[in-house]
Structures are given as C-alpha cells and as structure tokens.
Image (tube, rainbow, N blue to C red):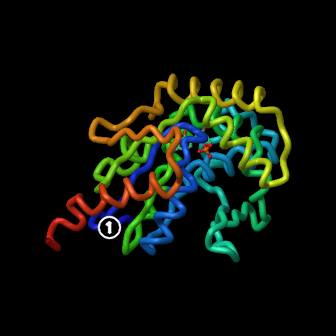
Amino acid sequence: MMDASVPVVAVDGPGGSGKGTVCRLLARELGWHLLDSGAIYRATAIAAARRGIDAGDGAALAPLAAALDLVFEAPLDPADESLVRLDGVDVTGELRQETTGEQASRLAAIAEVREALLQRQRDFRQPPGLVADGRDMGTVVFPDAAVKVFLTASAEERARRRHKQLKEQGVSGSLTALLEEITARDARDQGRAVAPLVPARDAVVIDTTGLSVNQVADRLRELLERSTVYADKD
Ligand code: DC
C-alpha cells in the first residue's frame, strides 16, 4: 500500500527534456525508488499490440492495463535503465522504440486507461522515498509530492537528445523525423482532456536547454533540501 509519509520528488515534462536520466541519477544517489511511469504506458502499448488491440480502444485496453504482468528489474550496471519484463519476456529494447512511444501517447489519452494504471504507479511509493518521472506525477498521481519540478527544453534540443540516446542504443533514425514525432507527441500529450502535460500549480519549471544532467540533478537536490522533507533537520 501507498504510504503518504514517504517523500516523493515528482518530475514531469515532455519527452527528451532529460527527465529519465536525471531521475535515475537522483534516485540512485538518494537510495530512493524510481518510477518510470512512461515505461508503464509503453508496456501497455506493447501488450495491446501483441493482442491485436487498437491503441484507441479504451474498453479493451482498461482491463488489459489493470492486469498487466509487468516487472522492473535492477540492471547489471546501476547507471543503466531498469530491465522491463512483460509477461515474463524482456521488452526493454522494444519499449524505447519511437513507434511504442507513439502508441503509448495514444492510449495515454484515454481516461479509463489512466485510471487502470493509477494504483500500480502509487504502489511505487515505498520507504525511504520515490523519484517519479512522468507527465502527471505532480498533478494527478502524487499531488502531495514534497518537490515538484517540470522540466522543459526546446523541441530541437529534445530531438537531439533522443537522437543521441537512440544512437547509443544502436537505433538509427533521422533527426528531422524525430523532431516531427516529438512535436506531434507533445501536442497530443498537452492537448488531451485527462491529465494533460502541464506543470502543477506548485511546480518549479526548469528549462534544461544547455544544462548538463548533473546541473539539473543539483537543482533538484537543492529543492529537496529546502523542502519539508528535511525541514526538521535544521
Ligand atoms: O516518457 P515516455 O516517452 O516514456 O512516455 C511515453 C508516453 O506515455 C507519453 O507520450 C505520454 C504517456 N505518458 C503519460 O501520459 N503519463 C505519464 N505519466 C507518462 C507517460
């Protein structure tokens, strides 16, 4: 069960804003749990594709999402992303493909799907703390998070980062096509009626264009140190 006394750092923002890398670094340094909520939406998209369910079919997707057999496993190298097993099969590579992200963004616009995935995300809130990466961590999933940040970066910078990341994973692709995909996905994530991609009212917005991962992580640590989590320790 979720424990509301466990502190959460909620990190939201569009794809390529650097959230994933920063969250992984911060969680590792703090020794806290990590929630990669995008991976849950992506895994739902893969599960749907395997069963021939369309990413727009909410009635079929909601029970599928609720019953997802999904396991995150610690990677051999702690700097790497977690291994993700769906129905016992390693889907880590497929998870990161742009087509998976596109389908995830489509099904993420459906209210029943989001509802079906809510508790699964909240269950990651375990002692001593949680770093949560997503689109609606501060607005919907953990509205009582101790720290809320919203990371942004120009679309060009985000496309460049995604391109580099994909290249490191051995996936080639055109930068122009990526820029188009990222822009289209942002528009859908921002424009949807349920849990749209917007900063929480009390979120600190950080433009990460030109900032290194370490610089962004430093900012987050600073905010955490100033938050209620450590308020009693002064
Ligand atoms: O962060 P990501 O690229 O792995 O996310 C893939 C898609 O999943 C994203 O385009 C929108 C959706 N998503 C969401 O709606 N809410 C979240 N908390 C995380 C991801």
In the image, 145 versus 116, the foreground residue is 145
Q: Residue at x 44, y 38 (%)?
A: 207
Q: Quadrant of the rendered structure where residue 108 is?
A: top right
Q: Is any atom of residue 71 visible in this view?
A: no
In the image, 118 versus 180, the foreground residue is 180
Q: Is residue 218 above or below residue 55?
A: below
Q: Residue at x 79, y 55 (%)?
A: 169
Q: Quadrant of the rendered structure where residue 230 is?
A: bottom left
In the image, 93 versus 17, the foreground residue is 17
User: What quarter of the picture does the N terminus occupy?
Assistant: bottom left
Estimate how packed mark 1 is, as few (under 14), some (14 to 19) or many (20 or more) residues with alpha carbons within 10 Å: some
Q: Residue 208 appears at what percent x and percent y?
A: 48, 42
Q: Is any atom of residue 11 visible in this view?
A: yes
Helix, strand or loop status at disc 1: loop
In the image, 147 versus 196, the foreground residue is 147
Tell which residue pokes out farthest to the front in this image. Answer: 210
Q: Residue 232 appears at what percent x and percent y?
A: 14, 70
43 with respect to 131 (left or right): right
Confirm or reject: label 1 Cβ below 8 Å from ligand 1: no
Q: Residue 162 appears at what percent x and percent y?
A: 69, 42
Q: Is residue 197 above or below residue 67?
A: above
User: What quarter of the picture does the C terminus occupy?
Assistant: bottom left
17 with respect to 227 (left or right): right
Callout 1 amino acid: Val
Q: Quadrant of ligand 1?
A: top right
Report which residue position mark 1 lands on. Answer: 6
Q: Is residue 157 above or below residue 97?
A: above
Q: Residue at x 55, y 30 (%)?
A: 154
